[in-house]
Every structure is written in structure tokens, then in C-alpha cells.
Image: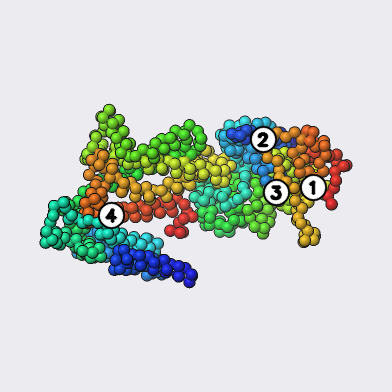
Amino acid sequence: MRGAVIVVGSIGAVFFLAMGLTVGLWEALVLLIGVAFISSMLWYPPHVMRIVGAALLAVFLFAFLQTIAGTVPGAVIAIVLAVLAWRFLPVRVHRRVGFMVPSMVMLIFVTTILMYMAPGSPFAQEKQTTQQALEAQAKKFKVEKTALAFFGTYMKGLLADGTMGLSVKVQGRTVEQLLMPALPVSMSLGLLALVIACFLGLVLGIRAGLKPNSFADYSSMGVAMIGISLPNFVIGAILLVIFSYSFQLLPVAGWGTYGHLILPAITLALPYAAYIARLARNGTIEVMQQDFVRTARAKGLSEQTVIVKHALKGAILPVVSFLGPATAGIFTGSFVVEKLFAVPGMGQWFVTGALGRDYSVVLGTAIIYFTIITLFNLLVDFAYAWLDPRVREEL
Amino acid sequence: MSSTADTLLQVDGLRTQFVLDEGTVTAVDGVTFDVKKGEIVGIVGESGCGKSVTNLSVLGLLPKPQGRIANGSVKFEGRELVGLSENELRKVRGNNIAMIFQDPMTSLNPYLTVEEQLVEVVELHLGMSRKDAVAHAVKLLHRVGISDAANRIKSYPHEFSGGMRQRVMIAMALLCDPEVLIADEPTTALDVTIQAQILELLKELRDERGMGIILITHDLGVVAGMCDRVIVMYAGRIVEQAPTHELYASPQHPYTQALLKSVPRLDEAMHEHLFSIEGLPPRLDKGPFTGCTFAPRCPQVRDACHQGEPALEETSPGRHRRCVVPLGELETLA
């Protein structure tokens, strides 16, 4: 125990020094406090954890709700929900919430530091601008001198004013005005891609895994290899040529009808379908060799029952684990596909925001991606526990 | 081998092969034995000698597509099982002939409750309603010594200890009151006190239901305490078969002699090394063999042993052995 404290302490000290020298002392201190706060939660007794979890949930809900419902109703709803959560949710959920909310704050902070460390500024132009004009612009868009000051202003904007700030590059628009129309587009595209990836991957993978080294196996894995190797703009272009140009079944690009959703979703899904197929194949092969599958056969069950009832759950567990990273990849990696099919999703803001140094836009997309990915990881954990009873107690 | 009214299972000249990329391996060759009502038949031998494959062949559970029965017959109550369709075989599995396996940790499905795993057998073979099936399963769990069975049946396998899991396996095998129970090393993965309890339970159940039991093991102590008859296997063949007490009193094959000699004894001095058989069993994929398969490791080997494989001969009623050394010339154990 003492040895561990010394090791962790010295690593922390070295890290802190390095951070202090490169990023700045105050930034390093805030970072250290944040990390210490998150890790300290491991030692909280259950009743303390419930209070902390509910309080953090209230803050998060308030920040989110006041934009939609206004300050007073937002506060009331947030407090009511937090009290309900404190009273009824199990401690393990509070632990997850207690981890998620400060992590999001740390994400905002670290992103801010990184944006400030990179050379250049949101107002840099080829044309020379006067010092006064620059300062006036900085004041208008609330771009502070240091990362720490910007972080403070941004958090105040989020919590007190319920806004994600003004976009520097799109004049006269707030970040929420830019992102809110894009969010449902990205969500429907991402979810459909996820469903396609799972369905295609599982069907191909399980079919291959049930008969390893057969024609079914080689053909499925061959398709999977193509899916993994080809970049998605190539796949997208091929699909466009076939379905939009030659057969004229689906629209080439744009947004608005269900038809517009299909090709980009398939393009986005194929590489993940390929990964899932490989995971499902290996999972199936492994589970079919398990002793309990032999037991099921020895009981006289039909091969179909053996597979569906006894083998399937074990076979798809590796796929479920992969769904967390897959979700992150599908949602954040949609930029190329959105460009190719001219889909007005979040991906464009993620990339143009970073390239144009639009600080508040970058932070806005980061917050939304963080929320989506964290929620999906939570869902994946629940799905895992539902499938495997041995994991249930650990959650 | 003679068939009488109380013969349940008759295995005759069974030859099981695995077709692999490297060639065909004969894992079981010419195995012949039978099991009568209320009888416990032990099959012993080292790892890889074909004990388990023999019994998987009986139920047609060989790994596909590599495994196949090349020759021989398996009759259950006079009905031929080899060549039956998968559908017909499934009606026998778990219903007339049930199996329990070595490792209860891995042989039960970790993703399903014990109730689900027990009830599906009853529903399948006995056609009971869900409610009756649960009641029947609880009754059997209770019988194999699981207290509070009505509640425990809702648990998952990982919530039971190793010994309790093996009891669950036994209950699962007994659900349809099978005529023959194949127990494939049922106690190998358990600690010694639990082993004794499980074996005692199997004996009780045999007395109660009059089923025939095939007990596969490599533990000669278990055989001595449990079995009426013993089959000794080596490299896929039966080398000796005898009533248990006769086998222990006067083994008639050098391999059996050596096996018995390697059992540690309490009355021997502590500082002496345990006896062990030199070398390893032959690799079956290197076959076919010209002489006796045990010859390279046999302490009593002579020229005749390499001349051709000795046949399984009956030395007295119910006693068989496969050895060229005449009985009179066989050295007895020191």
C-alpha cells in the first residue's frame, strides 16, 4: 500500500511538473484537482456517493434543460429528477453519473488547453488587422487570453446563461443554433448505420462461424476483408454509381426523404459490419467448442436449439464489447460520408470548427459526441450484464 | 458376446476414426463390451486412450465433420444406434442414455439458469407442461442433495460450488429416468471429500433405479470402490476386461499390472519413489501398428510381441485379455 502511494505520488509529481512547464501552472493544478476528484469517488461510502451523484446529475440536467425550458422550469425539473435519482437509483448508477459529469468538465478543459496550445488564433487573417479591432472581436466572442480564463467563461456560459457560445466563423449564430438541426441528422444516420452493421455483421459472422473453413466461411470473410480494406469514400462512390447512376433507385445526395438515408448509412456501416462479422465468427467458433454445447447436444436438443438457445449469447458477447468503440467511430467518423452524400450532419462542424479555430463550435461538438458515446457505453454495459449473468454482480 | 434380457447396451467391434488433413486417425479400434441392468462398468486407461471417444460414439456425438464410426455396432435394448438418423438419435440422447461430464464448471451453460437447463430436457422428452416440468426438476435436484431446491433452481451455475454443480449435472441426466448413464470422469475436477459424496450418490441412484452406469475414469481407486466390471483400454483398444475383484487380485495384462503398481499405497515406505510406466502411449496418428501397441513400454516384451497384434481372447467366463505372453509365463507383480 505504501509502495503504491509512493509510486503513484512520484508519477503524479513528474506529470504535474511537466504539465506546469508546458501548459502552465494553474492549468496543471486544475487538471490535477479534477483527476483527484474523479478518482476519489472510488472511496466514497454508498450514502455519500448517492448525494454526490444526484448533485452532479442536477447540475448536468440544469445545464441541458435551461436551454430548452428556460431557467426556472429547468432548475425545478433538474432538482426534482435529481431528488428522484437520489432516492431510487442504485449506487452503481450514481457511480457512473458521478464519473461522467466531472469527466465531461475535464474534457472541456483539456480540449480548451489543446486549442490554446496550437499556434494561430480564430481571428488570424491574411489581411493585417489593428490591435483594437482584434481586442474588440475577442471581447465580442468571449475569447479570453488564457485557456484557464476561457474555460471559466465557457463554463459560466453553459451553467448560468445556458448557451454554448457564439460561433466565430458563422456570423450571428450561437453553437446550439448550428448543432441542434445537425444532431437529429447525425443521430438517425449513425443509428441506422449501427443497426445495419450489427445485422449484416452478425448474419455473416455467425454463418461463417458455424461452418469454419467452408464455402460459407470463406465467402463471408472475403466480403468482410473487402469491407475492412476499402476506404469508405471508395465504397460510397461504388454504391453511388450502382444505385443512383446505373439503376437510379436512390437519390445521389442531399437530405429530406428516407431514400436519402440509405446509401450514406450503408457506406458508414460496411467497415463496422466487417469487423463485427470477424468478431462474431471467432466468437461462434469458440463457443461451439465449449463443453456446455456438447452437454446441450447430449441432452438430445436439436441443432437449432443448441445454437439459438445455448451458443448464441456467448457468441455475440465479443460483438457487444466492440459496440462501444464502434459507436464512437461511427458518430465521429461520419465526416467523409457526410461530405460525399452532402448530408447536413454534425461531422462538418466537427471538422470545419477544428480547422477554422472556432473554439466554441469545437467544444460543442466534443460535448455532444462525449454524451452520445458515454450513453452508448452505458447501454453496452447493461447489454453485457443482461447477456452474461456472471457480469451482473460486478456492474 | 452373449445378449441376455437384462443387457441394456451392447457395443460390438466399434471402430471410430477421425479424418484430418494429416490423414485418418483410428481413435477406437474393435471395442466390444456390454452393460447390464444395475451394473457399473468401469473404463480405465491413460489420457487419450479412447475412453471418451468410445462413449461419444455410443451417442453419435463425435465432432463433425472429422469424426465417424467406421465399423461396428452399438445396440441399445437390441436396437441398432449406428446409422440412425440424427432425429432418431436425439430421441435416445438424454432420454434413454444420458451423460455427465468431467468438468461441471464448463459443462453447464453459464448464460442460462439451472431451471432453464433442466426444464428444457423434460419438456423435450417427456412432453410435460412448464409447471410440471419445473416441479419434476425440483424433485430431482432435491434427490441429488441440493437443499432449498425450489429457490436454488432459479440460480445460475456460477452461483453453485463445484460439487453442487456436479449434482446439478447428475440431476439433469436423471430427469428422464435413463436406462444407461455414461459418467465421463465425473469426479476428476472435484476435491477428494466431494468426490466420495458424488460417487456415493451415483451408487445410491443405481440401486434405486436399476440403471446401468458406464464410469470412465483414470482413477483405479474409484474403480475399486464402484465398479462391478472393469475394462482397461490402451491406444484405442481393450487390453483387458474382468470383474473388478478378479482384476485387482490377478491382473492378466502387463499394462494392467503396471497401472495397479503405479497406485500409491499407504503401507509402503514414504521415501520410495512412486512406480511409473516409462514412456508415453503411442501417437494414434502414427498408426496402423504392426505389433502390440504396448510393446515399446512393456517390461515383459518379447520378440513375438512385434510380430502382429494379439487378439482379445477369453481366458475364463467374463475375463478377456489381449497379450501374447501365455498366462503361466506372465510375471506377477512384486
Looking at the picture, do discs 2 and 3 lie on one chain?
Answer: yes
Looking at the image, can residue B240 be seen?
A: yes
For the point 61% across and 32% down, which residue is it?
B84
Looking at the image, can residue B33 be seen?
A: no
**Viewer-proximal residue among A130 and B219:** A130
Q: Is residue A192 above or below residue A58?
A: above
Q: Give the label, 4 or 3, closer to the camera.
A: 4
| Label 1 residue SS | helix
The residue beneath circle 3 is B218
The residue beneath circle 4 is A366
Residue at mark 1: chain: B
Residue at mark 4: chain: A
The quarter of the picture where residue B75 lies is top right
- Please identify the quadrant where the C terminus of chain A is shown: bottom left
Q: CA distance from mark 2 to mark 3?
A: 21 Å
The residue beneath circle 1 is B257
Q: Is residue A82 above or below residue B122?
A: below
For the point 26% across and 36% down, which residue is it?
A259
Q: Position of residue A191 (x, y in %)?
A: 32, 45
